[in-house]
Image (cartoon, helix red, strand yellow):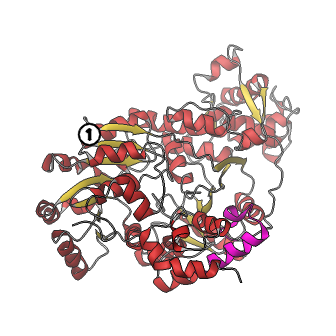
């Protein structure tokens, strides 16, 4: 049974225009959709905000039957269904949050052919009754979202994904489409193997997110740095702050609230009701900041997140890319900001050395970390470095910190030799110390500890006076990042030489280091506040007034309907309305993001607001 807003002969382009309100497909969307509509399997690697959802939603509306979407995003399924319902698409979900009656009604609608799309949590497929239910239904396709979760070496592994190969075995004639925004070539190969997608067509879009400005700042009281970032550049904006531990999440959220920033915590130690309530508020309200561990937000649908901040170093480039990709899904300017310092490198190296698993596992973790450290330490364009990690070559972006304020590269070989020599001299005495004490020796600082231990008598005492303590900490950090210095896995985090240190000491290896330039304070926003600032940045005063009126109207409608504001219209669509000022329903239908169902539901209200006074 076709969707309520479509005719049975609708083409993919008809669906794009009528249901979703967009005129043309982007990138590989048309080719992907044609392949799936034609019954082929597909593997799709496409960045967040690139339009992955349309690649299975449109085929589900064109093909006969119900599109079944396997997604780990249980907390977001209701919002996904609400967003589709607002477009006139018949959608439902089955997961552990539902009561018996809700599940039974969804199952009845599925078997009656009254659903265009059904969202399923992967663990539901462990239940034999679910497989039996799907066998009775007419399935148009299977979409496996967040497909990188099948990779056991990936950053977001989900054991339940390992059983999804059963879909191809039990429904060999139903096309499958696996999608992810985060996969290296190795991960893509693993997805293909584990899901049995050997004959699938592969589509790899550019991983570039040109609207995101990537920045890495030296860590120096990171909570205060975060506060300055929000106040100067993102006042009133929605944002996500990632921390490594639950305690840090709680403390950071409290710190922001105490300083006038509305913030909520999210981590696995909170009860389910609190987590769900906080996530719901973040999705539905404007200008909230969510402080979270990486448990939060995989695939988060909120389009107007204007910044993602990391107060601790991510473990991999994949994880960093996935998390920062939650910013600017609407294509408007956004910031990915990371505070990074020596303690991050020491901590991550120590965690790897003390981790469970065999040597191969630790080598894989080290490779992930090495790539992340290389991204942090690069003197070249960060975007080029990150895209190269995913197998994509590009040119300098002109929009990351290393492009906007290029750091100096300097020959740090002599400095590295001095520091490594200090470690050697201590080791010769059977002593190992952390970075702080070694630096005190190099700069000739006569602390009580240095004096007590007699370290002022070492030949390396005071040989590093040409650099200050902050600069020496940068040297230590970069030597650790380059694998030229080691740190013990014990709680003392003492420094020691590694095999590669010998070549530096012998003068056989040059060591290039980066010197970060002084950062300029961020500019305050003056035109408008809130998460619409990026959308309104270059609007005329008249258009800006109209844009704000549209946002107020949208907020009232969303509150009345109990849905996030973006379910009504995205900021980009409101911006287009404010600048194009349509005067009829036909004109309004031509605005990007206005489909048939939204035109019918909201058209008169929008035109009334846009009418000249």
Look at the image and give the residue range highlighted in magenta: 530-554
Front in this rendered view, residue 308 or 332? 332
25 sits to left or right of 241: left
Residue 385: horizontal and vertical position, in percent?
60, 34
Task: Give the residue displayed 25% in from the left and 69% down from the top.
Answer: 115
Check residue 316 for magenta coloring. no
Residue 540: horizontal and vertical position, in percent?
77, 66
Crowd tier of the residue under label 1, counting other residues whose Cα lies within 10 Å: few below 14, some 14–19, many 20 or above: many
265 sits to left or right of 81: right
Indicate the quadrant where residue 465 lies. Answer: top right
The rendered magenta stretch, by its main secondary structure, is classed as: helix
Q: Is residue 468 above or below residue 81?
A: above
Q: Locate the C terminus and report the quarter of the image it occupies.
A: bottom right
Q: Is residue 226 above or below residue 429?
A: below
Task: Give the residue displayed 63% in from the left and 76% down from the top.
Answer: 550
Q: Is residue 397 above or below residue 293?
A: above
**Which residue position holds label 1?**
197
385 sits to left or right of 558: right
């Amino acid at each position: 049974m076709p969707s309520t807003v479509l005719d049975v002969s609708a083409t993919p382009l008809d669906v794009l225009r009528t249901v979703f309100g967009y005129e043309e497909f982007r990138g590989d969307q048309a080719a992907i959709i044609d392949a799936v509509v034609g019954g082929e399997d597909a593997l799709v690697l496409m960045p967040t905000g690139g339009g992955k959802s349309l690649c299975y939603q449109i085929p589900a509306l064109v093909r006969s039957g119900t599109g079944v979407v396997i997604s780990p995003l249980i907390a977001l399924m209701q919002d996904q269904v609400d967003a589709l319902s607002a477009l006139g698409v018949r959608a439902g979900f089955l997961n552990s949050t539902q009561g018996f009656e809700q599940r039974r009604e969804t199952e009845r609608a599925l078997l009656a052919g009254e659903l265009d799309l059904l969202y399923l949590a992967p663990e539901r497929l462990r239940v034999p009754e679910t497989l039996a239910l799907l066998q009775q239904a007419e399935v148009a396709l299977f979409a496996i979202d967040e497909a990188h979760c099948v990779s056991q070496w990936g950053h977001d592994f989900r054991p339940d994904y390992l059983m999804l190969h059963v879909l191809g075995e039990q429904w060999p004639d139903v096309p499958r489409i696996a999608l992810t925004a985060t996969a290296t070539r190795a991960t893509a190969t693993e997805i293909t193997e584990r899901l049995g997608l050997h004959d699938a067509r592969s589509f790899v879009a550019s991983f570039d997110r040109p609207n995101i400005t990537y920045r890495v700042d030296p860590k120096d009281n990171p909570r205060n740095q975060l506060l300055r970032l929000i106040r100067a550049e993102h006042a009133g904006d929605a944002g996500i702050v990632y921390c490594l531990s639950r305690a840090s999440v709680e403390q950071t959220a409290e710190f922001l609230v105490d300083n006038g920033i509305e913030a909520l915590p999210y981590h696995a130690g909170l009860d389910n009701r609190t987590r769900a309530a906080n996530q719901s508020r973040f999705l539905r309200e404007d200008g909230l900041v969510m402080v979270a561990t990486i448990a939060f937000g995989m695939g988060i649908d909120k389009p107007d997140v204007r910044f993602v901040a990391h107060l601790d170093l991510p473990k991999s480039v994949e994880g960093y890319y996935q998390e920062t990709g939650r910013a600017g899904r609407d294509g408007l300017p956004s910031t990915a900001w990371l505070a990074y310092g020596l303690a991050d490198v020491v901590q991550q190296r120590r965690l790897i050395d003390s981790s469970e698993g065999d040597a191969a596992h630790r080598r894989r973790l080290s490779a992930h970390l090495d790539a992340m450290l290389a991204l942090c330490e690069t003197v070249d364009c960060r975007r080029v470095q990150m895209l190269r990690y995913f197998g994509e070559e590009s040119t300098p972006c002109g929009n990351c910190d290393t492009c906007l304020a290029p750091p100096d590269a300097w020959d740090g070989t002599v400095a590295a030799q001095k520091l490594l020599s200090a470690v050697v001299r201590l080791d010769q005495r059977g002593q190992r110390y952390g970075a702080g004490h070694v630096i005190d020796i190099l700069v000739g600082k006569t602390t009580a500890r240095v004096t007590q231990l007699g370290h002022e008598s070492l030949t390396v005492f005071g040989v590093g006076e040409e650099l200050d303590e902050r600069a020496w900490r940068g040297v230590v950090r970069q030597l650790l990042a380059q694998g030229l210095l080691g740190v013990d896995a014990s709680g003392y985090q003492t420094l020691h030489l590694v095999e590669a240190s010998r070549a530096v000491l012998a003068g056989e290896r040059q060591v290039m280091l980066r010197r970060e330039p002084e950062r300029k304070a961020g500019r305050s926003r003056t035109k408008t506040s809130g998460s619409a600032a990026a959308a309104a940045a270059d609007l005329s005063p008249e258009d800006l007034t109209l844009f704000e009126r549209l946002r107020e109207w949208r907020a009232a409608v969303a509150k009345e309907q109990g849905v996030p504001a973006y379910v009504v219209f995205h900021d980009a669509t409101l911006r287009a309305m404010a600048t194009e000022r349509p005067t009829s329903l036909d004109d309004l239908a031509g605005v990007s993001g206005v489909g048939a169902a939204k035109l019918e539901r909201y058209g008169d209200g929008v035109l009334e607001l846009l009418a000249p006074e």
